[in-house]
Image: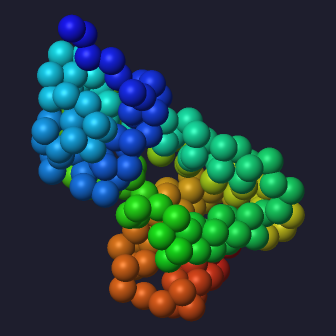
Amino acid sequence: MAHTLKSTYPELVQKAQHLFWVKGYKSVSNEDLAKHLNVSVSTIYNKYTKEMLFLDALDSYVVSLSDPIMCQIRASKNGLQSLKDFFYMLIEALLDKTFPRSCIMVNTVVELRKENREVSDIYDRYFSNMRNSYIAVLKRAVDMGEIIHPEKIEQYADYIVGMIFGISIYYKIKSKEELFQYIDGHLALIQ
């Protein structure tokens, strides 16, 4: 008799995303995944592989969480204040434990580096969208007179992308006030 799944595939992806977010990819066995998803281990081996669920979980994160936030940042009429607001919101979410851990994409980059081409493609797309969003804000900041060195926009965008990695570590050891000072200090260096 065939086993009937109690969840749809998108529901399984969301459940798997949480597990991968908390434990990372390598620390999750097929058995852990099956138990967490309340499916048989054979389902993981034969129907929805660990890698398939992980890739779709990362893609879901980008499409449903990151891309809409980056879209809001690009649509903002503010210059550097929109970046400050974004980072403050991110700090609040990390400290309130809205997310199970720091950014799943940052965690993935640290854990897997360039070990898997498909994973690399997802986080390359993620960081490219983030960087392009920052560039749009920085160009707006130039138009508003907030940046006096427009020739450095590309460097500033890379610098701001790096701030995500810093926050992913610092939120574990710094107070909210120190994190806000970190953001304010780093954004003040952009001129």
Q: Classify residue 3 by image quadrant.
A: top left
75 or 9, which is in the foreground? 9
- Give the image location of residue 147, x and y in percent: 74, 68
Residue 162 visible in the displayed image: no
Question: In the rendered view, would you say 94 is above or below 180?
Answer: above
- Give the image location of residue 115, x and y in percent: 18, 37
Left or right, 66 with respect to 124, comes to right
Left or right, 114 with respect to 83, comes to left
Question: In the rendered view, would you say 180 is above or below 86?
Answer: below
Residue furthest to the top: 1
Q: How is the image coloured?
A: rainbow
- Give the image location of residue 102, x and y in percent: 40, 63
Question: In the rendered view, would you say 46 is above or below 107?
Answer: above
Residue furthest to the front: 1
The residue under the point 18% across, 16% down is 46
- Give the image location of residue 45, x and y in percent: 15, 22
Left or right, 4 with respect to 124, comes to left
Give the quarter of the figure containing the C terminus. bottom right
